[in-house]
Image (tube, helix red, strand yellow):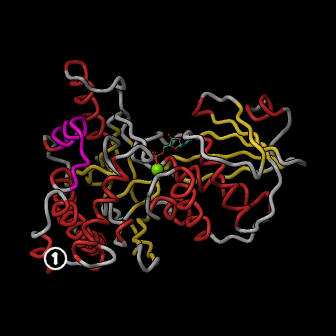
């Protein structure tokens, strides 16, 4: 008997899934109207669902102990926990005039929660896909991404940009999704055959609804007011001298966003030219900017980055995701990622014994490339 059957006493009628993602470059640029370059990873959130005849929503997540939670459609209100993602979804769909009834849903994800690989957008999009199928909702993949962002902004209280739900909804395995978040246009960029990316999870967990992420966002808004622009996207490297006149830390926050946008554009051309060394340099510059200017790194991430610098086969390395913990992504030659990643993971685990690293001492590298 499946877990769904055990919990709900019936079988699901719909199943849907959506992937997590690794952001190759372009961090904290999406809510500034800038550029991002994420790609989906072979880790997914899966949702099984069955429509009910009444207005009760019952939901259980294997990642949250499996207990059944329940509410009635129309009575959604934020509670400050994971049920907000589900409540936000039904509240927003109802507000848009989509007709729903209650349902039973079971969620199971192998995207690490709070690991910088966007478990939340995988959940948003997987649930929206399941509801679209079950209720035959006339929603496009772009609609799902926009709804995913609104669930987090309006219901969960995480002021995230469009990147994560967009790549969860539109991403294709083996391709990076180059997105202009102001114009809301995108292009699928094939990963060169000779490249491979390795993701290593520090084990340090963040919650995007919990403060620091939103603080960075407010700092960007303040920098915009001081500079007289509506979005930092409007500025380029030629404006860096103006940015220098801002008070600290706004100066560094704005400098990160402006230089990072430029690095995304350069990374796209490096990928298209198959120039891995140029891409690697951009990774390293992006990491330094996140660490020094945007201040979203933490000591455990710096340990991983330092270990990755000790490996000659690593071409570039950077913190990926919103930061304050989470994962790093390395660039290497195809076929070498698993072995390199394993060595760095082992060295990191050994350090964890002496230094105050998180309990999670055994990390498994995740390798993605053209064929993964
Ligand atoms: P990230 O998206 O980088 O993993 P977030 O802080 O944005 O980190 O989202 C993590 C939160 O999303 C979790 O704390 C939890 O509330 C929710 N979440 C993600 N996946 C699941 C899941 N499978 N089941 C229940 N809640 C989930
Ligand atoms: Mg998230």
Residue at 20% x, 49% y is 314
Residue at 55% x, 51% y is 122
Residue at 70% x, 68% y is 96
**Compared with residue 272, is residue 165 higher up or lower down, i.e. above or below?**
above
Q: Main secondary structure of the magenta part?
A: helix
User: Quarter of the image containing the N terminus?
Assistant: top right
Q: Is residue 332 left or right of residue 185?
A: left
| Position of residue 86 measured from the top left corner of the image (x, y, whole percent) | 65, 48
Q: Nearer the viewer, residue 297 or 269?
A: 297
Q: Nearer the viewer, residue 15 or 92?
A: 92
Q: Nearer the viewer, residue 186 or 143?
A: 143
Locate residue 137: give its quadrant.
Answer: bottom right
The single residue placed furthest to the right in the displayed view is: 53
**Compared with residue 341, is residue 249 higher up or lower down, i.e. above or below?**
below
Residue at 30% x, 72% y is 268
Helix, strand or loop under label 1:
helix
| Position of residue 132 measured from the top left corner of the image (x, y, whole percent) | 73, 61
User: Quarter of the image containing the C terminus?
Assistant: bottom left
Asked if residue 231 is among those painted magenta in the image, a careful observer would answer: no
Q: Is residue 370 left or right of residue 276?
A: right
The single residue placed furthest to the top in the displayed view is: 353
Residue range corresponding to the magenta coloring: 294-308
| Position of residue 88 measured from the top left corner of the image (x, y, whole percent) | 63, 53
Label 1 near ligand 1 (CB < 8 Å):
no
Residue bearing the label numbered 1: 237
Q: Is residue 177 left or right of residue 303?
A: right
Asked if residue 301 is among those painted magenta in the image, a careful observer would answer: yes
Crowd class of label 1 (few under 14; some 14 to 19; many from 20; radius 10 Å): few
**Compared with residue 123, is residue 59 higher up or lower down, i.e. above or below?**
above
Locate residue 66: give its quadrant.
Answer: top right
């Amino acid at each position: 008997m499946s877990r769904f059957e055990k919990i709900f006493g019936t079988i699901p009628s719909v199943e849907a899934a959506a992937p997590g993602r690794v952001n190759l470059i372009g961090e904290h640029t999406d809510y500034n109207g800038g550029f991002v370059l994420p790609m989906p990873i072979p880790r997914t959130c899966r949702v099984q669902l069955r429509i009910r005849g009444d207005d009760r929503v019952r939901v259980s997540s294997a990642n949250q102990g499996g207990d059944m939670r329940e509410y009635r459609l129309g009575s959604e209100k934020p509670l400050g926990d994971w049920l907000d993602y589900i409540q936000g979804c039904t509240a927003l769909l109802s507000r848009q005039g989509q007709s729903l009834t209650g349902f039973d849903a079971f969620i199971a994800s192998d995207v690490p929660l709070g690991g910088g690989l966007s478990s939340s957008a995988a959940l948003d999009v997987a649930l929206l896909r399941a509801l679209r199928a079950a209720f035959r909702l006339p929603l496009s993949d772009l609609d799902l991404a926009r709804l995913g962002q609104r669930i987090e902004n309006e219901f969960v209280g995480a002021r995230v940009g469009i990147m994560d739900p967009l790549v969860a909804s539109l991403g294709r395995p083996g391709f990076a999704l180059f997105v202009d978040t102001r114009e809301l246009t995108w292009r699928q960029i094939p990963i060169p055959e000779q490249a491979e990316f390795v993701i290593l999870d520090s084990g340090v967990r963040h919650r995007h609804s919990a403060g620091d992420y939103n603080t960075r966002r407010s700092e960007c808004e303040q920098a915009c007011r001081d500079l007289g622009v509506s979005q930092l996207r409007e500025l380029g490297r030629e404006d860096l001298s103006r940015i220098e006149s801002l008070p600290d830390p706004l100066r560094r926050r704005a400098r990160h966003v402006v230089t990072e946008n430029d690095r995304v554009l350069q990374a796209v051309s490096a990928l298209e030219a198959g120039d891995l060394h140029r891409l690697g340099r951009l990774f390293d510059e992006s990491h330094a900017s996140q660490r020094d200017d945007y201040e979203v790194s933490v000591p455990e991430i710096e340990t991983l980055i330092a270990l990755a610098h000790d490996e000659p086969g690593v071409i570039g390395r950077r913190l990926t995701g919103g930061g304050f913990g989470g994962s790093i992504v390395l660039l290497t030659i195809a076929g070498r990622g698993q072995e390199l990643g394993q060595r760095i993971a082992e060295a990191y685990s050994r350090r964890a014994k002496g230094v105050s690293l998180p309990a999670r001492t055994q990390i498994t590298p995740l390798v993605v490339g053209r064929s993964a």
